[in-house]
Structures are given as structure tokens and as C-alpha cells.
Amino acid sequence: MEHPSRRGVLGGAIAVAAVAVTGGTAWAKPGPAETETPALWREFKATPYTHPQVPYIARAGAFSGTRRLPRRKVVANVRDYGAVPDGTRDAAPAINRALADAGRRGGGTVVVPPGEYRIDGIIRIAHDNVVLRGAGSSRTTLRATKNLTELIGPYGSRYGGDKSSWSWAGGLIWLCPQARWESLTTAIKAKAWPFEGWTGNKRDEWRTLTPVHPATRGDRTLEVRDTTHLHKGDLVLLRLADDADHTLLEHMAGGGAGAEAYTWDDKTKLTSYVPYEWPVRITSIKKSAAKSTVQGTITLERPLPLDVRPEWDPRLTTHVKALTGAGVEGLTLEAVETPQSPHLLDKGYNGVTFQCAYDCWADDIVVRHVDNGFGLVSASACTLRRTRVAGRGAHHPYFCREGSHDNLVEDFTIDERTVPAPSGTQLHGINVEGLSSYNVWSRGTMRMGTFDSHRGMPFANVRTDITIENNGRHGGDASAGPLFGARFTHWNIRVTNERAGLTKIDGLAPYSATVGINEVREFDQIDVPDFSGDLHSRLELYGTTNKVHPRNLHEAQRDLRP
């Protein structure tokens, strides 16, 4: 491992400036003499890829976690397509024509000059390497007049009845590849539930590229049986199927007596999330000279998130073509202000959603008066930077679901709601569910909400360097199974109202770490652990915040990258 770079040392100062941009609160960084280093950090540095409680998340985010996002060449201006920034005429068709033209040219940036643009439809980014860029969130505003129910129709819910799946999917700015968009809209019009995983509605149509030989969590090289259909730069799925004894789910929970004693068979929603599908890019291929069952070795962009065992039928497969290299930057999306809907009846005044997206991003984006703010639905390796949820209050300010992995949300803000919450509504906060893994929330200010695990056993996710008024509640159907899998980590968390729920997780999450949190107490929603016996969880520097070293777990891991 490399020692921290000078740029890494300067990162604290940069972070303070970045938080100020999004309206967060900046705190002075403690001097070396004031800091305390937990034993967990020393242990992690010795075994970064296989630590039992702390996940390796140094490569979370777009382009393997790079600090600098691409700047694409400007190829179109929405004014040239008829968009007028006077707030009176529908600019959505003009914006979408400009985005489609950029896609046909192979990518580029579509600029939205300063002003207010009315949009009566969905803004769709459906082509690789296309970026929609405003003049800044304080200068370019898109005012949305309609919701997704009006624009597409009721989204058939797996819960049936009048429940709306716009409560956890879709956006008025929607980054989604064309093929996925077509299958979604067809299913919605048929009032069917469109499966949201990486293999789309027709999971049985995935094609095996090669079986994979056994490997260990943290490995970046894999021995494969066949390299014929593999190429450097390919985005593939590592697919792991559970066995009859549910040993894959047990492994995601950390293993041991508690996971073995847990009843998995009746958790039908949870079991619908497997096979586990992890998208990853191949960075190199080496063919074997000797004739054997191993035809070659491949190197992956990121370390393996789990062990690879024969009983899980491990293989690399195809998937619905992902949207890659696309982004949205420098604008505010403001919906017409309506009262927040009762729980699960959201109309779909949703903000920005990434679906089946990889290496995509949002930067300097504000959403206001939305039902749901920023969504990651079967989206991986995406970066949300300098984002903010404001206005009348939201059901999910941020949601991360249905097999979303390796995403990074940093320098984010959830504002206090501007109107009281109507009766029967729910506030969740920063949500993760559905076997989503290795996602990071870093440097955040949450003036409302909670650290929502929505069941579905998400695992190996990190929240770090966050201030929170912990006043939300988590959700999750009982059939979705445990609140947490293994290696959830909360690191340097400042809870302003001293409420423990879902922030201090040493009594809830197996093989977890809670490090550097102020003293909190249980009240309101109180949970019991899903797994029996010793959870093998760790609690360090309890009652201490801002003095924990390193202050930000994600930044510190990234600074140690070789």
C-alpha cells in the first residue's frame, strides 16, 4: 500500500469547502494531538480486503472512484433546439432532442444556459457519454409541472391495490439505457411489475460468458474456464446463485451460528433478489498456455465483494446494456409544490434517477418539492457529488435499491422540510436495500431523515462523516428479511438529537462497526437484531466525534490505494 499523498492530506480542507457549497456545516479539523485512532483502523490497514467488519470501499463511485469527473466537449445548446428560459413554454421536447442528437454523435455535453425552463415531460438521458449541464444549481432551473403518474401512468406495484411503485423508482430526470426504458414502459402500461435487476425483466435470457473458478473476497484476479467471449474493457456480471441451504445468504450475513439459525425460506422478497448480480469491468485478460480447466486469468476493476464458491454456480454473464459515461450537472429541478402523498401513494414528482447505469454521475444538483430525491435502481459505480434535497419534504430523499453496488454519494445535504409533514406520510432519509452492497455516503448534512435500511439485507455499506437530525423511520416488508448483512460501517457520525435508531448499530448488524459516534439513546422506532447470538459487531470511540482518526473512512481508504 502507498502512504497517504499530499493531495490526500489536503483533502480535509477541500472537503470543508465542498460542504459549504451544498449548504452543509463545516467543522474545524482536529489537530494531530487531539485525534484518537481506533484499533479497527490499524486492523483494516493490515487486512484491507478481507477485514471481517470494515468493507473495502476505496474504489466506490464512477471510474473506479476517481476524484475528477470527465468534462465532455460541448456539442449542443438547448436554446438552439427551441428551449426558451422564460418559464412559460414547455422546454422538455427541445432538451430531449438536443440530448438525442448528442447521443447520435457519440456523446458530448448539452448545455442549458442560465434561466428558468418549464418542463412538462421527462428529461431522458439514454445514450452513453452524454452530459446535461446547466450553468450551476443557482443559475439554471427546470420547473417540472407534471408527475410520473400523469406522464407514464400508474406503475404496477408488487404490493397490489393502489400502491405506487413511483415511491421507489423513476425520475423526472431519468438516466436509463434505451433498451431498459422500452421494457419498463411496456411493463408499466401492462400494469406488470418490471424486474429491476441488471438482467432486466427477462432474467432467463442472460447468456453465460464463462464459468468462474473459486476465489476469495478481496481478490481482483479470477481464473475462468473460457476467455473466448471476454475482452479487456468489457462490463460483465458476476452472477452467484444461492443453494438450497441458503449458504450464499448466510455468507452475505457474515456466516456463523446466527446466520445458520435464521429462517430464510419464508423471506420470499429477499430470495427474489438472488442470484446476486455484481457488474464489474475487466481490466486485463491473460490466457493460459497449459491445457486445463483454466483457460485464462482476468483482472477486475474492483476487488471481489464476496467469496466465489462452486456451490453458488459462479459465472460471468451478459446483462441488459448499461448506460455508461453519462451525467447531469449544474442545475436545480423544482417540481410544482404539492402536499406529500400518504405512504406508498407517491405520484412520482421524483428528482434524478439512475437505472441500469454504470460510471455515471450527478454533480451540483438540487431537487426541490419532490416525492423522492435521488435514486439508484440497479445502478452501480455512480457518483453523486454536491447534491441537495430541499423543499416541502420527501418520502425517500435518497434511495439505493435492487442490486445497486459501489456507488458514492458525497457532499450531500437533506434540508429541513419547509412545511409540516401531512398525516400518514413517511420520511426515510438515505435508503439502501435489496442486497445492495459497497455503497458509500460521505460528508453529509441531514437536517432530517435517518440511515434507512429498508431490509432486503444490504451489506458492506458505509456512512461516514455525517451530521444527522435522526428523526426519520426505516421501512421494509417482513418478507424482505434482515435489516443488515455483514460489514455495515458507521464512522464519525454526529447525531444532533441523540436518537440511536439505525445510527448506532452494534446491537443490530452482524459483523458491523460503529466508530466515533456521540452518546445516543433509544426512542421512537426500536428494533431487535434479526440474528441470534453474538453479532461479532464492534463499537469504538463511543461518545467521541470529529476526533476519530481518520475522520472520513472513505477518504482515508482512497488515500491508501496503491
Image: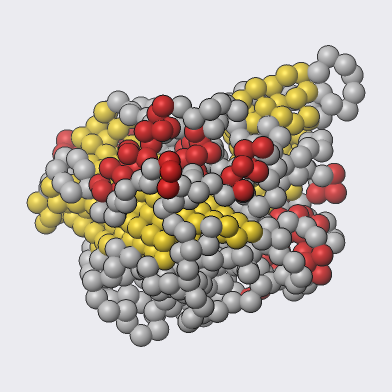
Residue 100's place in the image compared with 5, above or below, is below
Residue 141's place in the image compared with 266, above or below, is above
Task: Identify the residue shown where x is 48% and y is 63%.
Answer: 543
Q: x, y percentage for residue 88?
A: 11, 56
Q: x, y percentage for residue 49?
A: 66, 39
Q: x, y percentage for residue 223?
A: 78, 29
The answer to whether residue 320 is left or right of residue 348 is right
Task: Identify the residue shown where x is 53% and y is 57%.
Answer: 541
Task: Identify the residue shown where x is 27% and y is 28%.
Answer: 75
Q: x, y percentage for residue 277?
A: 65, 48
Residue 305's place in the image compared with 514, above or below, is above
Which residue is outermost to the bottom? 423
Question: Which of the 4 image quarters holds residue 342?
Answer: bottom left
Q: Check the picture and name the quadrant holding the N terminus.
A: top right
Which residue is outermost to the right? 292
- Residue 492 visible? The answer is yes
Q: Check the picture and name the quadrant holding the C terminus.
A: top right
Task: Identify the residue shown where x is 32% and y is 38%.
Answer: 14
363 and 144: which one is in front? 363
Question: Which of the 4 image quarters holds residue 476?
Answer: bottom right
- Residue 127 visible? The answer is no
99 and 506: which one is in front? 506
Residue 544's place in the image compared with 442, above or below, is below
